Image (tube, coloured by chain):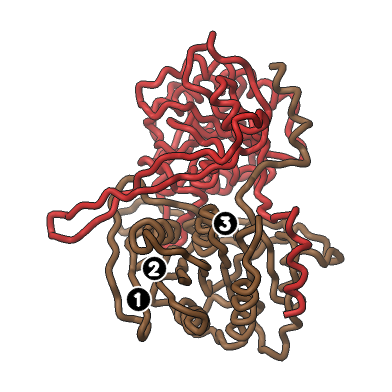
Chain colours: A red, B brown
Amino acid sequence: MILITNDDGIVAPGIKALVEVASKFGEVLVVAPDSPQSGQGHAITLNQPLKLRKVNLFSGIDAYECSGTPVDCVKLAKNVLLKNKKIDLCLSGINHGANSSINIIYSGTMSAAMEASIEKIDSIGFSLLNYSFDADFEPAKFYIEKIIQSVLANPLKSCKLLNVNIPACSQQEIKGIKVCRQGDGTWVEEFQEGTDPRGEKYYWLTGKFVSYESPEDTENDIWALKNNFISVVPSGHDLTHYTELNNFKYMENL
Amino acid sequence: MILITNDDGIVAPGIKALVEVASKFGEVLVVAPDSPQSGQGHAITLNQPLKLRKVNLFSGIDAYECSGTPVDCVKLAKNVLLKNKKIDLCLSGINHGANSSINIIYSGTMSAAMEASIEKIDSIGFSLLNYSFDADFEPAKFYIEKIIQSVLANPLKSCKLLNVNIPACSQQEIKGIKVCRQGDGTWVEEFQEGTDPRGEKYYWLTGKFVSYESPEDTENDIWALKNNFISVVPSGHDLTHYTELNNFKYMENL
């Protein structure tokens, strides 16, 4: 059983492309948000109930739209819809836009995959570096098929989560796959300020991604994508800063 | 300048307790959600504008309620309200309930602190292991004061984020501070199922935390809190699974 979700919503072309590839490998269940959920990170819905509605969007494939976040979709799929069924693989995406570098933290797509990985389910998040709903997913699909096939043949071990980003170029231009670390970068934010119809001031988030990586460092996903490689970052959910951990031991004497 | 936020909302007793302690150390600005935002993780608001409203809740201290998520609060504080001002420290909390172990991933409180740390601001998230709004914050305040004082005197280096959890016991019972790693655990979920007034089925998230740690391992926050220590986990935002990274190099040949 392959579980598929995303954060762009169940009608986004990216999830359709992913379902087309994944359904070659066996039974698929789609549970995805009923509205766009980009930037929802690892949000879960605690203060209100969730709805699941069966939809007929993917020919011959069970699919449900969910009123919650991408992580809610995974929790509902696992605990309600697939209660007694083994999930061999959870796939999230194909996201419309990059989830490389720091974006993994903000991404609903990657957080949904991470949620499955926390439950020890092999999980992959796929993103294409093209925000457009008209993006061409064909070059991405070629590599996604290879990656799914490989993970099904060689199940993941202690690392249960792969963050896969695909450059927005033709199949001929893609140089291959690069396995690397999460690149260091951030968003330099500005807020678009305005006044609403009631005269109240509002702020609307906008920003620009800035890399902190040296262009000579080839072992991170920012470099890989800039150089037309597909980046694969084996990822986890342990946020401990191990290299500095012992430097804080002085706090035990406070 | 000390920036204070939380995820329980600006009227929660926990943030009031934190403001009381922090204001002893200098100028404080409070920017916190106008409604409870527990479990919002690293969600940001992309699809709608945000509002900021000045409130008079903390005597002599500038405070704003924000219509967005905890991470939105930090972004607005840094980029709109404190545009040209150095933020010496960002404090988030005091959270009503634990943010130890895997909870750091779901927590709006910790995500707000993490957002500031991504911006290279020294950041600390504080949580008390008591969900009640009537919780006694006095024992926590005693240690929080020591920790703030220590971080202001010794600014953080490459690790910019501390996850501090405080057991719900009396000051006499607290055994001290334990600097440790994030404990391994998960939530075993069940959904409360019901039917809404329109006859539609709903699902409401509930669950129980389960530790994967051996009781003999004393170097994680689950052990620390169970044994009445305050846990301090130096934390980051690089999710790369370094120990397994090279085992995935075979994917470069797909």
Q: Nearer the viewer, residue A63 or A84?
A: A63
Where disc 3 sits, the SS reads: strand
Residue to which mark 2 is pinned: B31
Q: Are marks 3 and 1 on the same chain?
A: yes
Q: Residue furthest right?
A: B216
Dot 2 or dot 1: first in sequence order is 2
Badge 3: chain ID: B
Residue A96 image-quadrant placement: top left
Mark 2 closeness class: few <14, some 14–19, many ≥20 residues within 10 Å:
many
Dot 2 amino acid type: Val
In front: label 2 or label 1: 1
Amino acid at pointer 3: Glu
Give the x, y percent position of residue B211.
73, 61
Report, in whole angstroms, how far the alpha carbon at label 2 lies from the one at label 1: 9 Å
Going 60% across and 26% down the picture, which residue do you hit? A224
Q: Secondary structure at mark 1?
A: strand
